[in-house]
Image (tube, grey):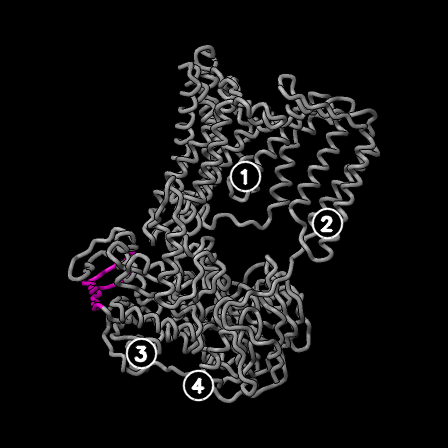
Amino acid sequence: MKLELRGITKRFGSLVANDHIDLTVEAGEIHCLLGENGAGKSTLMNVLYGLYQADEGEVLLDDQVQHFAGPGDAMAAHIGMVHQHFMLIPVFTVAENVMLGHEETKLGGRLDLPAARAKVREISERFGFDVDPDALVDDLPVGVQQRVEIIKALSRDAKVLVFDEPTAVLTPQETDELMGIMRQLKQTGTSIVFITHKLREVREVADRITVIRLGKVVGEASPTATNAELASLMVGRAVELTVHKEEPTLGDAALQVQGLTVIDPIGQLVVNDVSFEVRRGEILAIAGVQGNGQTELTEALLGLQPRVQGSIRIDGIELGSSSVKRILDAGVGFVPEDRTEDGLVGEFTIAENLMLDRSDGAPFVRGGSIQRGALADFARDKVKEFDVRTQGIDSKVRQLSGGNQQKVVLARELSRDLRLLVAAQPTRGVDVGSIEFIHKRIVETRDSGVPVVVVSTELDEVVALADRIMVMYRGRIVGIVPGDTPRDVLGLMMAGEHPAEGAAA
Amino acid sequence: MSTAVQHPAPAPQVVALDTTVVTSWKAPIAFAIFTLLAIALAVFAPQDGDTTFRLSTQSDVIQLPEITVPTMPTLWITIVLLALATAYSAMLVASKRRVPVWLVVVFAVLFMFGFLTWAASGAAIPVIGLLFGSLSLAVPLIYGSLAGVLGERVGVINIAIEGQLLAGAFTAAVVASITGQPILGLIAAMVAGMLVGMVLAAFAIKYFVDQVIVGVVLNVLVVGLTSFFFSQVLAPNAAALNTPPRFERLPIPVLSEIPIIGPVLFRQTLVVYLMYVAVALVYFGLFHTKWGLRLRAVGEHPQAADTVGIKVNRTRFWNVALAGAIAGLGGTFFTIGSGIAFNKEMTAGAGFIALAAVIFGQWDPIKATLAALLFGFASNLQNTLSVIGSPVPSEFMLMLPYVVTIFAVAGLVGKVRGPAAAGKPYIKS
């Protein structure tokens, strides 16, 4: 089925998320929509799917103008969507999720679960998925959950299938499999819209590429374009795709973790007997698919987890069971995974956020009152040093873009005397320009002799920053390998396969 | 240099996380406290004589014999059993195992038996009456908790159960008094409860007002309205407006003659029989029909429900209205269900106890019903003991239902997860 979007405009207040966007997707074509976070890709697709109403413009399917009042209409018109954040009910089974919204019933209004199971099995077999219709979605790994989403769309005979950032949660192997599934779908005549900001994937699978920046279509590209060409089109200027860093000057082991185990409230060992060390002047990157214990590991390092066993030493001092306060005072800087939740107070100003963890004494607090003057000088300094784009130090942090928020977090953490920096997902949801800057600062921190732990699910970031790479899977360490380990090896490790003997450093 | 490569390679498919048991000493400690309590009763307040348990009423076709036990020896045997259960639970926890639910139930039943034996020394406990009364007192709680389960399962916290019960009780009394037809009163009560539910739904869903606050305000509003009408309109014209006829008891043939169960379950009024049907229907509906599947989807992940074409807010509105109707029906128990005239604030917190039953029952209609029965039992125990003249001060016994509620909800629930989106308005950008 041919899909055409004509002049779609969507405004949120004064923000124009989509500005007269035109897009044509031919039948049996994989069309990539490339753009940075916040460029308006997801908004566009939500308009297509009936979740948002466009302010201007129209959607055409096979040259017929469509009016979607809600997702129900879009689905009836055979548009399917695999959402970035899966639209699955965690406490339902696969079959229940697939049947939801178009349930078949038997006598007495009883749900016809056998029919739903059969449907799941039939579609699974067609594409070689191995999905148990009676499994609870909550128990499935994300890769399988995504397949459930695909089955859900196909069970309603989707002819146009939208994938919204589908690879963000997948291992490289799962990503390759997904590409295979897309090609398979394409052969059956399904049109595919593939939204992403990852250049490699685009070039591998796309038939055509449309690039969106700040809500506008800025150009089309062919899949043969180079990474640099695509990146500059996407960002609007030439970008540095690699991080320059010298060979590390290694000092003593500064962070020593021995037999660390974190137990969650239902008794699962989310971090299971983990031991590693980081030397001064070294970046250890922790790689792995989201949800394999990295979050809990970093929180344990900061003393934020309640059930922790094992030992954590910084410069020989045991901090395993200390309070967060003591750990911070010991010189641990922490960039949390979710900055809006754990890193910043949105309603506070930049200046106030910069002193959040130093509210108990000089230089910012004297005799119980905040020294506004000292704070303002400090904040102005840091805003300049970290290139935070803002109207002033009294702007609320909530109003800043993701990249600038992250710079505020980084400025606060790096302005203390550090003996360890833990940065979790330092560039998640951050624009390319800020990514360059943040990476540069992390490398500088390393070069000043601070041990650094970076947790990232983006393999690009891991490879760019790491001196050594530690891969986690299901709470355990799969292996610790040198920074120049090939991606395919890392990919296998992220799926839990151990590297060949020789690869271990 | 790495020492991490030490585990055998797992298969690349799903590997379950290793688990350990997070043990809790809550149960053994609670057991120990109750065992000590029992010992304290036996040592400091010994009761001479025998205790009789009466298992039949005089009208029963099949008469069961009365059981008479000597008070103190029975209490001491019970204490030994309680101590054994405590030791067993401590042993389980020490060896990193969980205390099973059956042990908690056995312990509770044993303690209750011991306590009853002690409290009713020298008298006879009418077991049938105790259970019959428990069920009766549980009726509004069960209707209320069904309303709570439906509301929370669809994503709206229904604090207004109290108000819905009260509105139902008031309307039932007035309509039944005027028409002389209890069945019309029942229908009117459902409408009244539904209206309260609709107000809650409108504010919570359309205007995103905090659901707890709307619920509390509605409760206060209904108390105010019914009290106002009671003192200004009903009290001066009590004969015409506030002398409701009652539902007669309808013994079900054959079933009502089963020993113990028959007199308790099957010699009840229409309100109670409707309750049996309501519990079964809500259970079947929630877990086996399209309606229930959609309702639960909306309460768990409204956005996901929206993306498959389910109208989230419409689903919420009508189900909260339905929940209100069920609670209104429960309110009839207070007036036409018992043949009592309406009085100010006569629901006396039953709606809040029902809310506790929802949580204690883990948002499941059957379990919530069982929880409500437990609370009903606690209330009726107090009535029964004061009638047979037990040595426990009645003021203390009055606290019993509420103490049970607090212990049940705080002590035993803990980590159960309710519907994920309960209390959160669904706002589309």
Q: Are marks 4 and 2 on the same chain?
A: no
Q: Disc 1 marks which residue?
A: B368
Residues rendered magenta in the picture: A1-27
Residue type, label 4: His
- Front position in the image: A25 or B67: B67
Q: Earlier in the sequence, mark 4 or mark 3?
A: 3
Q: CA distance from mark 2 to mark 3?
A: 62 Å
Q: Is residue B417 magenta?
A: no
The subunit letter for the residue under badge 2 reads B
Q: Disc 3 marks which residue?
A: A203
**Residue at 43% across / 83% down in the picture?**
A243
- Front position in the image: A55 or B147: B147
Q: Are marks 1 and 4 in contact (CB under 8 Å)?
A: no
Residue type, label 1: Ala
Which quarter of the figure has residue B225? top left
Where residue A256 sits: x, y (%)? Answer: 64, 77
Q: Disc 4 marks which residue?
A: A244
Q: Disc 2 marks which residue?
A: B89
